[in-house]
Every structure is written in structure tokens, then in C-alpha cells.
Amino acid sequence: MNAIGQMQFYVAVVLGVAALAVEVWAFADALRRRPDAFVAADKRTKGFWLAVTGVALAVGFVFLFQVGSMLGLLGVVAAGVYLADVRPALDRVMGKGQGGRQGPYGPW
């Protein structure tokens, strides 16, 4: 294997591990939240998001070293949707996230 091939392999490993870390984070966060908070935030149910993030985690584990795979990308996107959309809504419902992140026109 030449130097460029080795570098591509290492970059793929780093990206795969980073994607897996995001998926673990999303699943662990969904696991520790109260079931009623999901319904109160109007974000489906806890079981639904545990299934979505759990499948994303399983797919991320299976496709750890295949960064360019479509299923691996879908797993990262599913975890990203949870972390970017559902998690902040749950924080608002549970009264978190309103502390020091205040801008001149509200939270940011």
C-alpha cells in the first residue's frame, strides 16, 4: 500500500470512529431521557427515538471502516437529526439549556 492509500485509510478510520461516537452519544442521550418529555416536546415517543438511534448505532458499528457507504451516512444523519432537533426540544421541555446561552434577543 502506498503512502496516499495509507493516509486515506487512516482518515477513513478517524471519520468512522467520529461517526460512531456521534451515534453512541445520540443513543445514550435518548436512553436517559424521560418518556413523557418526548411527547411533551411533540417529538414522537421515546421508543421511536431509541429505535432510530439504536439502528443508527448498529449501522455505524457495522460500517465503521466504510465511510463512503450510504447506510453509514444514513446512520450519522439519523443521529444528527436527534441531536440537532429532538435533544434541544427535550432540553426546553425539561427546563434545561436556558442558562448562560442568552443573546441580546434570547437564547442562541
Image (cartoon, rainbow, N blue to C red):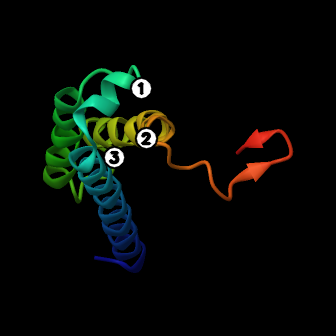
Horizontally, residue 39 falls left or right of residue 100, namely left
Disc 3 vs disc 1: which is toward the camera?
1
How many neighbours does mark 3 have within 10 angstroms: few (below 14), some (14-19), or many (20 or more)? few
Residue 61: quarter of image: bottom left
Mark pair 1, 2: CA separation: 9 Å
> Which picture quadrant has residue 83?
top left
- Please indicate whether residue 54 sits to the left or right of residue 37 in the image: left
Along the polypeptide, which appears first: circle 1 or circle 2? 1
Q: Nearer the viewer, residue 35 or 16?
A: 35
The residue furthest front is: 95
Left or right: 33 in relation to 42: left
Helix, strand or loop at label 2? It is: loop
* Mark 3 and mark 2: Cα distance apart in space: 37 Å
The N terminus lies in quadrant: bottom left
Answer whether labels 3 and 1 touch (C-beta < 8 Å): no
Among the two numbered marks 3 and 1 on one chain, the one whose residue lies closer to the N terminus: 1
Q: Earlier in the sequence, mark 3 or mark 2?
A: 3
Image coords of residue 102 (percent x, y): 74, 50
Give percent across and percent down for residue 62. 13, 51
- The residue that mark 1 highlights is 41
Q: Amino acid at mark 2?
A: Met
Q: CA distance from mark 3 to mark 1?
A: 34 Å
